[in-house]
Image (cartoon, helix red, strand yellow):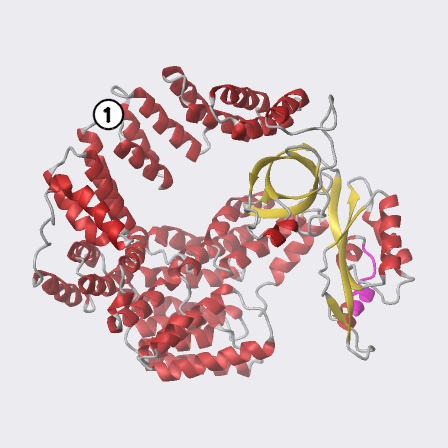
Amino acid sequence: MDIWNWVEKLQGDLRQAGQAQNAHLLNRLADEVSELRVDRVDALLPEARALGKALDNPWVDVYVGHWALRNRVGNRVEGESALGEAVALFERAHREDTLECPQSICVTQDLAACYGNIDGPGWVPERIEVCDETLGRIDPSWACFQCLSCEKADALLDDGRGQEALDYLQVQSDAIEACGKEVFDSFPEMQIKILLGMGRAEEALLLIEKREAEVAASGEYEPANCTVPRRLSKAWALAQLDRDEEALQQLVPWSELTPTYWRLWANTAAALCRRDPARNTWDLGTRFNTIIEHFAEVGSHRLLIEVAALSLELALQRGARWVAMRQLELARTHLAQLRQDRGAAALVAGLAARIDALPDVAPLPVPAAELLVWLNEQGEQNQSRDPEREAQWLLQAQAQLPDDEALAEMAASALSACGAQTEARALLWRFVRAHAQDDGPAAYTLMRWLTEQGDDAGLRQLADLYRGSVPVFAHWCEVQRARRVSDWPALEQAAQALLAASPGSHGARGTLARMYMETGRFSEAQACYAQLVELLEEPNAAHWDHMSAASAARDWDAVRRSAAAIGMELSSQDGVVEEPWGWVIIRSEENGEPMEYYARRSGPVTARIVENAPANRAQQVGDWVVFDAALVHPAPEEEEARENFIPTYAQVHVLERGGFARSWLIDGAHPGEDAWNAFVAAAEAQGWQVWSHSRPDYTVTDPDEEEGTLPGLLFTVAQPQDHAPLALHRFLQQETAKWPHPHCWLRLAEACDQDRQPHLDVIERYGL
């Protein structure tokens, strides 16, 4: 069964209603989850949930809820933290008004996976039961049949029944093929996971290489949730076979991983380090700490214990006893949260015995008062620092000298570098509570960490702690909290109070100016930047910010004053600043996703966008915008590269909309430069915007050509909002009739209720 039919129909209805962006939103949500872009999913969810409410469509609520949980229990491996949402969605999906929604089947997978994250072996019977119950309601033609089969196989693996899981998957695979359906990637991926879990690495490697060959032969695109686990599985298989160098080549960089693959990465890294202790460094330990703290935060208890056992072994190998002790305590805490023991207590007890057998922490190499100087000297001699090794000494020294702020801050920084964020914050809290009469570096470091970690309650506590003794610092805490949550009235109040207490605070004035820009109060932002220009010894950057604010406020005289102050010559003396300054790229944001468009710079910090937006994006062509003068991408260092460098700037305000509607995509063989130039001239005479999106090497296929390919042309046309799409459809029919090859504008034809078949024929013939 095609469970996406209803989604595609809804998208068609939305497009016909002029809501192409909402139609695209439903696809983007699933795509971003599949591409492991967890933060982008979070950014899309409010809009997606609002769409369900606006449409009053409970099926959309279930659809959005399912993909939200795929991100949480799938990509982020959340356990208890997501259980409430998983149970609520499961119950919601089984009400009368949503029971027929295909995604009501999918939420079974979400619930089973959530239990698996909390304590996989402990919840085996329930996981199998819920999968069997739902599988009994569908047949093998459903895509969900495959997802749920893999979920049940995973439960069997957690129960120590690996061969039974493999046999079960084979039965399910045969049933799928018997009804004429294709077996998805999830089956071989689960088979590989089972084989690796059983220690049958050679068989797993053969299956991986077979899948690699199939993908290469097909030439089809694969999302990250297919490529990343296969590469990691290959690395783990190779590591099990002692082929370490090959395993290292396959190991996916840490920056490309999401929590769902951390366990697989950890197993591989631990195996490689056991055979080569040189790989076992403090920064590797930091990554393990990151994994463990995440699992602790989201309530994935058994996963935490398993990874803590790996990490603890590595910590002991490095001689980092304090790290091992910390992780042992975490493992003990989460041991009590398991539903069934299944050998976890014995594992933790064995690790504890190993730690107890080790000698105590090494004594300080120098007296506590001399430790910082000694560590700096050691670092200069060795060209590197080891915060894990230093932390155990810094903690001893700080305990001996609890009033030494430099020691406290350095100890906290070492803990933080090692991934021990909770202990680092606790250390700084102890220090600032004992020294609340001064707002030294420790207080500012704590404020920064609380802001970065989104701890609003902590920022309020810190502000209250200093309100009587150092009110300026208390105001700074309030500014940081308000800025983080975009509470603009609170930010303005706190920043104004800070300036009243400390008129020379350039940081407060700059923060206030940025808030005014963010909220569209450009004249007030301009006034703040004008003050900074007068107060700063080096006002060059402030002049650029002043010009952005003044341009947004349309105070062109003020723009000219700042331009003159930094030695910039403008050709006009008064009125609007509108001059030809060459090409730039403007970056804007749409639903949290950056979009970049070519533009013509029209002044120091203004430009007009000349590139059409893609058909599924909000139109920006013709917009006259103000941008921030800071480069988004630094200019290249090589002189040759700099000659072709086009600077990219972030848009901060739209002075004037271009007034164009969505663009329409036209695709086909290139008609030749003369025909193309004539077409562009004719279209622009109508007031339409044309933009070619095809690269010089873009080609289309043509079975009638000897070489089989032709130069291609992919372009869009955008019309003013009051122009009818049907006029463009007829214009294209007329203008392209003379071209050697027909072109396709399927979506435009559909929007005009015109015959689709000619465009479908072009797509098939030319491989569009």
Task: State yes or no: residue 496 in magenta.
Answer: no
In the displayed orientation, state which residue is furthest to the top: 500
Is residue 167 found left or right of 689 in the rendered image? left
When the figure is inspected, residue 563 is found, relative to residue 430, above or below; the finding is: above
Answer with left or right where residue 306 lies relative to residue 605: left
Magenta portion: prevailing SS class: helix
Label 1, secondary structure: give it.
Answer: loop
Using the image as rendered, state which of residue 293 and residue 168 is in the foreground. 293
As displayed, is residue 457 above or below residue 735? above
Q: Position of residue 552 (x, y in %)?
A: 63, 28
The x, y position of residue 28, in whole percent, is 57, 55
Q: Which residue is mark 1?
A: 438
- Taking depth in this image into account, of 189 and 600 the one nearest to the observer is 600
- Residue 655 seen from this side: yes
Q: Amino acid at mark 1?
A: Asp
757 in the magenta segment: yes
Can residue 730 be seen by looking at this rendering? no
Residue at 48% x, 69% y is 227
Q: Residue at x 53, y 29 (%)?
A: 540
Q: Where 61 sits versus 466, above or below?
A: below
Q: Residues within 10 Å of mark 1 (few under 14, many from 20)?
A: some
Q: Which residues are magenta?
A: 753-762
Image quarter of the N terminus: bottom right
Image quarter hosting the C terminus: bottom right
- Residue 375, position as x, y percentages in the image: 20, 47
Pinpoint residue 157: horizontal percent, then vertical percent: 32, 74
Please state if 420 lies on the left or on the right of 185 as rendered.
left
- Could you say which quadrant of the image residue 70 lies in? bottom left
